[in-house]
Image (cartoon, coloured by chain):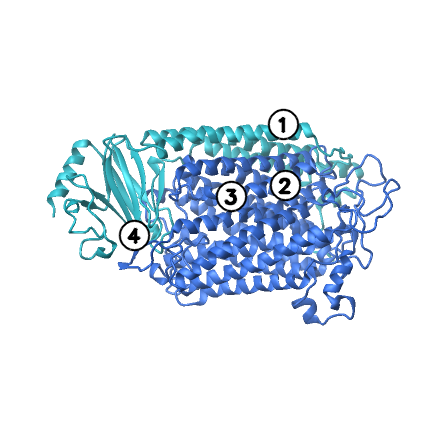
Chain colours: A cyan, B blue
């Protein structure tokens, strides 16, 4: 004897054919499924539209461009998402088995051409429009007068190096790396350019000045991510990867590692301090005094 | 030469006396037994993978909780990362690659093309046992000193390439991981050769390419993807193993200083691994999902009582997704330091994959449109698949654009995206296939009420787990973090995590209904006829379960396409492929393709 009857509606249906027809419609899963799909669509649209968990406000022009493209993509995919889920909801109710005969159709070449070209145009257009936000940030050199900072990562630390008064980074030799002795980056003492280099654990930049960050890693792959800049870049061992940005809001922003780098990955953290020009000069002078 | 002849010469045991129990159920060359072996292997693997994910979810919300089964009481960050690594590895390789393709493909490809077995039955057996050994090797990593690897299922060097100096689990654990993947690759390569040969050579008379069920097309295209993708992963895995044990430097550059020690490697590129890995890794996504697409098309036609809308467009879309799938791997590497110009190329190609994906979705809706939809359990899961495929596919449109990926990469947004589109959609394909073909495999139906309950809890549960995850990602929640103490802003996302964890436990508990239904129905389910769903393709032209040679010597000839439902004329609303009508040409001898 079966533990469960196959379907409640089948049992009701065995009583009377007319009840069967009605029960198949609304006791069967079709309506429930449709309601559920509509709820999912509505909840998703609501949470995205209400921005209950938004990304923090952007602090650079490049980040604003990214947000524009994000919003455009959100509208396009939002419409597609709604249409698809609601069509599915409509179809399961409208075409549920009510004893009718299914329509015999093998396809429709015109429709195939229509929706193929439509999606092609929409998706490619999105890609073409999205090009600008990427190209502005990544295909360009930093504006002249950019401050150069070298960002070095190693398990599970960020170290930022400023070139000092001479504007030149000292040579680095991996064999000289010795964190306990105060040389975590392996700056070669025999290179005079390195004598005035400043090494700090936080990234301090002046507001409204272009900054070029040269990312490198000593050991495994790490990453540099500041949400407010909409900027994420891996630090790849063996490479020096330049990225640039101009922060236009004074404040403190968290830098997090986003590339799995070992057991302390989740603790790898630093701060981006965007300060006024005078504060930045004061920081540089202060650091230059300390041996 | 006919198919039955070919295979029976390959397996002499089949023709004569009944083989012993050992030969029949353990080292069997019968594709049906091997298909079930793969199925139960995936069932075991998915259980382990799911339990690991529950530990992950639990730890994310209650990181300081004392757990009875953890040495030291509370879970350490490295134990957490080991769970993440093994969850991904087990799910991707031993569930999503194994169940849709190796399990159901093995069982039903020969049946659907009217063959008596795969082209190379012994190779088939070897494929399974290699996969089995690979799973054991992977699991054994939990038991070695240092534990399982912590480098994630993507195993990026240098973290994965230098031994335990980079972290716990990176010693023996990571080596075992690589060995497991290499063995798995060989098994998959042999399997894909078998699938391709079988589809090309062993089709029944009259079964032309345009009469193949879309499931067969999907398995065929997937097999080609496996052949090309796993070959590259195999090569990459060998190189990574050499870097670890033979002192080579394929992926390790000069001047590495790890834990304060200067390394002797030099000249390699960690980016190279990422290219090799994702050249495999992206097609792998389609290896997981294409068979599900085939199954969904098949089931949709069956329970809408309509031909698949736009059959040729569906085949074209499968092939297009397969081809484009090899040209988009760079979208995993937008932030890696790869040339930013190539990012735009990869971006456009990735967005183009949206086109065949949309073709599939439109044609599924077209199949439902005007149909007579019967809400059997497999149909519910097929409809759920479509909903997830749309949701997960559209979130990919964001990630396909490098400018947007720079904010979303490595956040929970990505985790939500791939779990919905590659994980859950594929799992719904597996569930749909299980409920649909269970009567054929075991001669009984699964219980419908339990099936519906399982569907509703899982469908709602999955949306509850993975929808909020998008918002965590958009707000900057980073994946693979052992806890939220690292950055201040993460604390505000913990309520969402708590909600997702509770939803995950409920959804996981709902899977017990499936297990109960599955094992209860094997013994006590309602007996099923040869063709319980009034379906048209060849697997329904034989007994449930099929005899050892599949068709009891009566090998079918095919007269028509696979989805002849609700023809304007005819006594019933379906016309099986193997039945001859007065209009059909007389049975032909040999291959017609």
**Eyeballing the image, is A146 above or below B23?**
above
Query: CA separation, marks 3 and 1?
Result: 35 Å
Query: CA separation, marks 2 and 3?
Result: 18 Å
| Circles 3 and 4 on the same subunit | no
**Eyeballing the image, is B121 above or below A101?**
below
**Residue A127 x %, y %:** 48, 31
Q: Is residue B555 left or right of residue B34?
A: right
Instruction: Give the SS element for disc 1.
Output: helix
Quadrant of residue A55 in the image?
Answer: top left
Report which residue position mark 3 lands on: B464
The residue under the point 29% across, 54% down is B255
In front of the other: A202 or A11: A202
**Which of the numbered marks, if any, corresponds to residue B383?**
2
Q: Residue furthest right?
A: B582
The chain identifier of the residue carrying mark 1 reads A
The residue under the point 70% across, 38% down is B308
The residue under the point 48% across, 53% down is B88
Instruction: Kindly check if marks 3 and 1 are in contact, taking CB atoms under 8 A apart as contact.
Output: no
**Which of the numbered marks, if any, corresponds to residue A114?**
1
| Circles 1 and 4 on the same subunit | yes
The chain identifier of the residue carrying mark 3 reads B
**Residue B366 x %, y %:** 67, 33
| Mark 1 burial class by Cα count in 10 Å: few <14, some 14-19, many 20+ | few
Query: CA separation, marks 3 and 4?
Result: 41 Å
Report which residue position mark 4 lands on: A218
**Residue A135 x %, y %:** 39, 32
Instruction: Give the SS element for disc 3.
Output: helix
The chain identifier of the residue carrying mark 4 reads A
In this rendering, the count of numbered labels is: 4
């Amino acid at each position: 004897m079966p533990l469960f009857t196959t379907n409640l509606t089948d049992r009701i249906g065995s009583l009377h054919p007319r009840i069967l027809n009605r029960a198949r419609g609304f006791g069967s899963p079709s309506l429930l499924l449709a309601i559920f799909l509509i709820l999912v669509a509505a909840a998703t649209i609501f949470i995205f539209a209400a921005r209950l968990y938004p990304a923090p406000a952007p602090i650079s022009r490049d980040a604003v461009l990214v947000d524009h493209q994000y919003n455009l993509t959100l509208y396009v995919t939002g419409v597609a998402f709604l249409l698809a889920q609601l069509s599915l909801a409509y179809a399961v109710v409208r075409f549920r088995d009510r004893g009718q005969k299914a329509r015999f159709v093998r396809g429709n070449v015109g429709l195939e051409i229509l929706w193929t070209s439509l999606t092609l145009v929409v998706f490619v257009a999105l890609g073409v429009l999205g090009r600008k936000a990427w190209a502005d940030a990544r295909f360009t050199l930093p504006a002249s007068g950019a401050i150069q900072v070298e960002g070095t990562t190693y398990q599970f630390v960020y170290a930022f190096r400023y070139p000092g008064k001479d504007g030149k980074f000292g040579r680095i030799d991996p064999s000289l790396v010795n964190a306990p002795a105060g040389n975590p980056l392996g700056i070669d003492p025999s290179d005079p350019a390195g004598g005035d280099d400043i090494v700090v654990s936080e990234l301090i930049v002046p507001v409204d000045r272009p900054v070029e960050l040269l990312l490198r890693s000593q050991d495994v792959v790490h990453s540099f991510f500041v949400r407010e800049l909409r900027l994420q870049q891996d630090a790849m061992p063996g490479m020096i990867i330049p990225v640039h940005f101009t922060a236009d809001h004074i404040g403190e922003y968290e830098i997090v590692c986003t590339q799995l780098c070992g057991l302390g990955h989740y603790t790898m953290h630093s701060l981006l301090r965007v300060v006024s020009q005078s504060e930045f000069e004061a920081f540089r002078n202060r650091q230059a005094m300390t041996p | 030469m006919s198919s039955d002849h070919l295979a029976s010469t390959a397996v002499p045991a089949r023709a004569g006396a009944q083989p012993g129990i050992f030969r029949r159920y353990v080292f069997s060359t019968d594709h049906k037994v091997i298909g079930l072996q793969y199925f139960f292997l995936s069932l075991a693997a998915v259980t382990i993978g799911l339990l690991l994910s529950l530990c992950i979810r639990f730890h994310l919300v209650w990181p300081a909780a004392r757990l009875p089964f953890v040495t030291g009481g509370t879970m350490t960050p490295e134990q957490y990362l080991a769970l993440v690594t093994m969850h991904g590895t087990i799910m991707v390789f031993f569930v999503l690659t194994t169940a849709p393709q190796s399990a159901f493909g093995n069982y039903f490809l020969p049946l659907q093309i009217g063959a008596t077995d795969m082209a190379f039955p012994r190779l088939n057996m070897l494929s399974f046992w290699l996969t089995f050994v690979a799973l054991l090797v992977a699991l054994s990593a939990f038991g070695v000193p240092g534990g399982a690897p912590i480098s994630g299922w993507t195993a990026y060097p240098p973290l994965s390439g230098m031994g335990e100096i980079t972290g716990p689990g990176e010693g023996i654990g990571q080596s075992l991981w690589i060995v497991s993947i290499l063995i798995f690759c060989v098994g998959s390569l042999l399997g894909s050769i078998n699938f391709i040969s079988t589809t090309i050579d062993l089709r029944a008379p009259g079964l032309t390419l345009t009469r193949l069920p879309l499931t067969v097309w999907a398995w065929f295209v997937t097999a080609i993807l496996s052949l090309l993708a796993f070959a590259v992963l195999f090569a990459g895995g060998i190189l990574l193993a050499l870097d670890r044990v033979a002192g080579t430097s394929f992926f390790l550059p000069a001047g590495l200083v790890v834990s304060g020690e200067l390394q002797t490697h030099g000249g390699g590129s960690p980016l190279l691994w990422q290219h090799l890995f994702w050249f495999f890794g992206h097609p792998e996504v389609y290896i997981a999902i294409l068979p599900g697409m085939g199954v969904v098309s098949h089931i949709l036609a069956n329970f809408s009582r309509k031909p698949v809308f736009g059959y040729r467009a569906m085949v074209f879309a499968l092939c297009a997704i397969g081809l484009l799938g090899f040209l988009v791997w760079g979208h995993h590497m937008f932030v890696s330091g790869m040339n930013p110009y190539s990012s735009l190329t990869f971006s456009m190609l990735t967005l183009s994959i949206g086109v065949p994906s949309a073709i599939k979705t439109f044609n599924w809706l077209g199949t439902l449109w005007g149909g007579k939809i019967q809400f059997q359990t497999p149909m519910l899961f097929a409809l759920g698949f479509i909903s997830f495929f749309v949701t997960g596919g559209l979130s990919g449109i964001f990630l396909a654009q490098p400018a947007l990926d720079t904010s979303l990469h490595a956040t929970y947004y990505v985790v939500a995206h791939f779990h919905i589109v590659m994980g859950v959609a594929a799992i719904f394909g597996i569930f749909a296939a299980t409920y649909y073909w269970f009567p054929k495999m075991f001669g009984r139906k699964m219980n419908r009420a339990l099936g519906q309950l399982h569907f509703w809890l899982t469908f709602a549960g999955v949306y509850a787990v993975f929808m909020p995850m998008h918002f965590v990602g958009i707000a900057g929640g980073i994946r693979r973090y052992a806890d939220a103490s690292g950055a201040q802003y993460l604390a505000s996302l913990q309520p969402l995590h708590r909600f997702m964890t509770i939803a995950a436990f409920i959804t996981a508990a709902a899977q017990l209904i499936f297990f109960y239904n599955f094992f209860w129905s094997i013994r006590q389910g309602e007996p099923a006829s040869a063709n319980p769903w009034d379906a048209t393709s060849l697997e329904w032209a034989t007994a449930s379960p099929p005899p050892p040679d599949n068709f009891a010597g009566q090998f079918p000839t095919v007269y028509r396409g696979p989805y002849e439902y609700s023809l304007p004329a005819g006594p019933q609303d379906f016309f099986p492929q193997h039945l001859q009508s007065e209009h059909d040409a007389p049975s032909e001898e040999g291959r017609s393709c």
